[in-house]
Image (cartoon, helix red, strand yellow):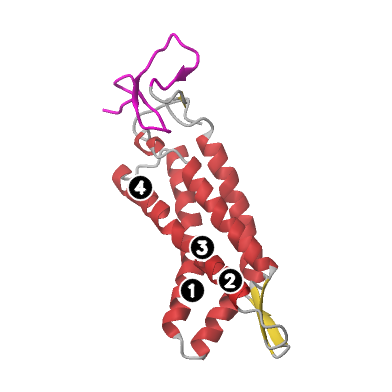
Amino acid sequence: MRALDAGILVCTECHHLNARDDEQERQYCSRCGAHVTPRRINSLARTWALLVTATILYIPANVLPIMTVSTFGNGAPSTIMSGVVELAHHGMFPIAALVFIASILVPTFKLVGIALLLYSVQRHQPLSARKRILMYRFIEWIGRWSMLDIFVIAILVTAVNFGAFARVEANPGAVAFACVVVLTMLAAITFDPRLIWDNTEPYQDHE
């Protein structure tokens, strides 16, 4: 049984349980005063919008140069993948693998994973709700590691600035990549995981 079936609304702000009152047009949490609804309003539409935008920005994030490292005035801009190849070429395989996982695999997994969750909920696919909720929690947990490249670039730009001797500059690819990370994090937040459990229990107002 879902909380909704028992006439209980969960506050998304303080997680307080409120008895559902059908006589009130808008109901507020009895503890914190936040607006409570059976499901997040327009959850699927907002998540799809954020996901599509992140997918579009994912292309320039990988095609455009993410940073330029200059030594004695000489340097060339590098993309995420070219940086991974250069690290591997210099024998730094653990760092290259870490950057590849955090900058390529993690964002790709998040985009595909959120898209699968949205599609399965909208189309009522006969998939295990427990497996989907585990995927959602994993997406939330792994999202923090997507910012690794941005943190590294921010530290390098601040720490390595010796004029003509050595300099690190952030390029447009870094901005696009940061936008992808933020948008996928927001997509995970706007998605209502309770919709996963509604897959087998028809609920008409979840969109």
**Which tag, 3 or 1, sits closer to the chain's start?**
1
Mark 1: amino acid: Val
Q: Which residue is mark 3?
A: 147
Mark 4: amino acid: Arg
Give me the disc on residue 132.
4
Mark 2: amino acid: Ile
The residue at the far left in this view is 1
Q: Residue at x 44, y 46 (%)?
A: 117
* Total numbered badges shown on the rendered structure: 4
Q: State the separation of the CA atoms marked 4 and 1.
A: 27 Å
Q: Is residue 201 left or right of residue 83?
A: left
Q: State the separation of the CA atoms marked 3 and 2.
A: 10 Å
Which of the two residues, 121 or 182, is positioned nearer the viewer here?
A: 182
Q: Is residue 143 magenta?
A: no
The residue at the far top in this view is 23
- How many residues crowd mark 1 within 10 Å: few (<14), some (14–19), many (20+)? many
**Which tag, 1 or 2, sits closer to the chain's start?**
1
**Which tag, 4 or 1, sits closer to the chain's start?**
1
Q: Secondary structure at mark 2?
A: helix
Give me the disc on residue 153.
2
Task: Check contact, mark 3 vs mark 4: CB within 8 A.
Answer: no
Q: State the separation of the CA atoms marked 1 and 2.
A: 12 Å
| Residue 8 image position (x, y, % from top left) | 33, 22
Q: Secondary structure at mark 4?
A: helix
**Which tag, 3 or 4, sits closer to the chain's start?**
4
Q: Quadrant of residue 203?
A: top left
Mark 3: amino acid: Met
Q: Nearer the viewer, mark 3 or mark 4?
A: 3
